[in-house]
Each structure stands twice: as C-alpha cells, then as structure tokens.
Amino acid sequence: MVLDKLGSSLKNSVRKIVKKGRIDKETVNELATDIQRALLKSDVDVELVQELTDKIKDRALNEEPPKGASSREHVIRIVYEEMLEIVGEETEVPMEEQDIMLVGLQGSGKTTTAAKLANYFQKKGLKPGLICGDTFRPGAYNQLKELSQRIDSVFYGEKESEDAIQVVKNGLNELKDSKVRIVDTAGRHSLESDLIDEMEQINEVVEPDKKFLVIDASIGKGVKDQANSFNEAIGIDGVIITKLDGTAKGGGALTAVSEAETNIAFLGTGEKLNELEEFEPDSFISRLLGMGDIEKLAQRAEERLSEEEMDMESMMKGDITLKDVYNQLESINKLGPLNQIMSMIPGGFNLPDDALDVTKEKMQIYKIIMDSMTEEEMKNPQKINSSRVERIAKGSGTTRESVNELLKYHKMMKKVMKQMKGGRTPMKKMMKKF
Ligand code: GDP
C-alpha cells in the first residue's frame, strides 16, 4: 500500500487510544504528539500539522460524544474527520464523453498517466483515444504509441512535427470516434514562458472538459507552489499525484493540493498501467488510519469494559465467588497497580494492606488452584473444609498454605466489596474511575 510508513504510524497512534482505560487530557496530548510526528515525517507542512492537532485536541477535550458513542470512539472519529479536512474534496470525474488535457513538468509521469487514464476509461466501457501533443521531448511519441498498443487504445501523433498545436488539432479530427480523448502535452524542467504559451494555445484548441496537472509525489509539500503556478497559468480542474509508491513524502504531496485550493483527482501508485486510483478522500483516509479495524477494536474494548462493570455490580451485591476474584484481579492488573487505582477513588476507603500485595506470580498460583476446584467449591468457597483444602492442594500441586491464602483473600475481597457498597462514593462514579 502507498504511504505505508505514514499509515502504520497513524494506525499505531490511534490504536493506543483503543487500549486506554479512559480518555483524559494526557491521552489526547499523547495522541496529538504521535500524529504530529507521523505527519511531519511524511513532509506535511508544519503549520498545517499544528492546526490539525490543535483542532483534534480542542474537539477531543471539549466536545461531548454523540449519543451512543463512547469517548474513545468519538476521539477516533474526530481524528478521521480532521484528517479528511486536510486532504480536500473529491474531484468529480464523470463517466461520459469528454476531452482531457494533461499538463505538468517533464518527468512528472504525464505520458504514463495518459495511458493509465485511457486504460481506466476503457475498463469503464468508454472508448479512449490518446493524442501525443508533446513535440518537445524526443521519446514522447514512441513512448505513448507503445503504451497505447499495450492497452489496445487508439493513438494519434506526428513523429516529425514540431508544431504541437497543429498535431493536437489533427488528432482531435482523427479521433472523432473516441469517447474520451486524452491529450498529452510537453513538459519542461520548470514552468517557463514558452511552456505556458504552448499550454494556453493547446487549451484553446482542445477546450478540454478537464485539465489535470500531473505532479510527482516526491516533491512533497512543494506540490502547493507548483499547483498554484499551473492554476494561475491555465486553470486546472484537479491534480494527479504520481509515484506515490516510491516516496516517504506522500503525506506532504496529498495535503499540499488542498492548500493550493484545488483537489486531487487520481493517484499514481506504480509503473504499471493499472496502477492508477481514483482519489476518494473518505476511503483513502479510512484505509490510512485502518478505520474499519480500529472501530471494531474500540467497540470490543467498550463491550469488555461494560462486561467488567456488570461483573462488579453483581459482586457488590455480595455474590462474590472465587471466579469473580480471579476475573477482578485480572482486570485490575490490566488497569495498573491496585494501590494507584484505589488512590483515584474519591473519598477512598480502608483496604487491608495485603490486598495491594497480589503479584502476577500469586495470581498464576491462584489460577492453578482454582483449576483444581469443583464448580461447587468455586461458587461457595466457605464450604471448603480442611480435608478439601488438602485435596485441592494435592490436585493442583501447590500447598495447603497457598490454598488457605486464596480462601483468605476471597474473604477479604468480599469484605472490601461490602465496604465499597456502604461507602460514601457513589458506585457509578467509582466505576467510571475504574
Ligand atoms: P513525463 O515526462 O511527465 O511524460 O513522464 P513519464 O510518463 O515518462 O514518467 C517518468 C518516469 O516515471 C517513467 O519511468 C515512469 O515509468 C515513471 N512513473 C510514472 N508514474 C509512476 C508511478 O505512479 N509510480 C512509479 N513508481 N513510477 C511512475
């Protein structure tokens, strides 16, 4: 995929949000910094990056999530929407009879793109015709002719002619049967006055329905100046960014187009003639951020959290089983050290010291012990007498002490739950903190 480096850093940044237990200022700032880093590496303009991340931060911290959406899903949506803003709008390319003129500097990929476009329309059932209006570059005629043969498209060119305007006039007459006529024009190394004159004259002759500027993505944010200059010179309907497959600066190229007050029409993503994509901003950004996957992950995280919340609520009623203890220890471990979590609870409450002292290793032992218990023992641990303790210790390959420790732990947690229930902190509020 094109822009894979940018895509993977953006995906990682957004994924981090999914993993967070809650969205706070620190999380949002971290996300903004990650996005900034990724975009700057991809040559997106510094000011644009700053504006974008300021907006993301402002909206993420001040906007209420819409009904039914979690704050996590909301933040991900905001990133998506703001990213969409900076690549501009879609350029309509109607599927109808039309004349297209391609302009751009030499080496930008115009000739290749002309053939790619012919292939694109041919696949949509619109018979294309290619006209070589480049009498400046010696190899242009042969190149376009050869490409048109490859895709079985009609071609018109005059190998020996130096009069591009006349060649184009003749070509339009010859290719009357073609539904989409694509005119390739000459490029130069820079936008010199003779290039402008020639473009203007061809423009008058063709009266194109669409004028596309072809730009090489490797110039990154430099696309803005080039697009502006061509726009002023002859007016363009959209930009085709080529060679997006071979550069890390693609992010700069993509975002610079909308800064130049024009839009992207197509993307060139390889040397092959089918490597041309219609630019659809929403699906492009969606892919770049891995939105489908991210949204699914976010939903799963929400579901998991609400399941845990339900478990906690039933435990509060005092129906705490050993299985609950285990699940609860597991989710607490995911959230962070227990004492830190307790310190977040407003009002606080007294927790026995050893409740904070359950290490991962101990949890592992508790799990092994629980695996050796019957359903009944898990549900009603108070019924476990000393001979059962002996059996469980043997069965699990642990000791009586460990089994007793687990039973003690269960009792203590039951007490803690009661204390929470009777405490000053409203249950809901506390769950939110969790
Ligand atoms: P022109 O001078 O503007 O007509 O440019 P060309 O069409 O001759 O292209 C210049 C070079 O860029 C050629 O080697 C093309 O194969 C290559 N090229 C064009 N588009 C792409 C693209 O999207 N990806 C890659 N990797 N190469 C491309």
Image (cartoon, rainbow, N blue to C red):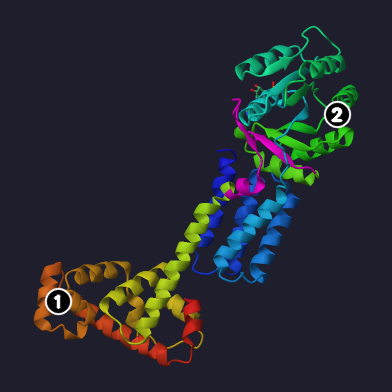
Q: Position of residue 335 (x, y in %)?
A: 43, 70
Q: Residues within 10 Å of mark 1 (few under 14, many from 20)?
A: some
Q: Is residue 38 above or below residue 165?
A: below
Q: Residues within 10 Å of mark 2 (few under 14, many from 20)?
A: few
Instruction: Give the camera-side residue of 217 and 361.
Output: 217
Question: Measured from the top left, where is residue 207 in percent x and y?
Answer: 86, 29
Kind of residue sitting beneath label 1: Arg
In the displayed orientation, state which residue is furthest to the top: 160
Is residue 55 among the parts visible in the rendering?
A: yes
| Helix, strand or loop at mark 2 | loop
**With 45 as the anchor, is 75 left or right in this view?**
left
Taking the image in four quarters, ligand 1 sits in the one at top right
Q: Is 275 on the left-hand or right-hand side of 377?
A: right
Residue position marked by numbered label 1 in the rendering: 400
At x 51%, y 85%, the residue is 346
For mark 1, give the secondary structure: helix
Q: Residue at x 83, y 39 (%)?
A: 228
Residue 9 lies in the magenta stretch: no
Q: Split into 4 quadrants, where in the image is the N terminus? A: top right
Q: How far apart in space, not on screen, are marks 1 and 2 (Cα)?
A: 92 Å
Q: Is residue 265 magenta?
A: yes
- Upstream in sequence: badge 1 or badge 2: 2
- Where residue 384 appears, x then y in whole percent? 15, 82
Question: Is 266 placed above or below 372 here?
Answer: above
Residue 131: which numbered mark, if any? none
Q: Which mark is residue 207?
A: 2
Locate residue 291, reporting x and y percent: 55, 53
- Report the mark closest to the observer, 1 or 2: 2
Q: Residue at x 49, y 68 (%)?
A: 21
Question: Does 360 sit left or right of 37 as displayed?
Answer: left
Q: Are marks 1 and 2 in contact (CB under 8 Å)?
A: no
Magenta region: 262-286
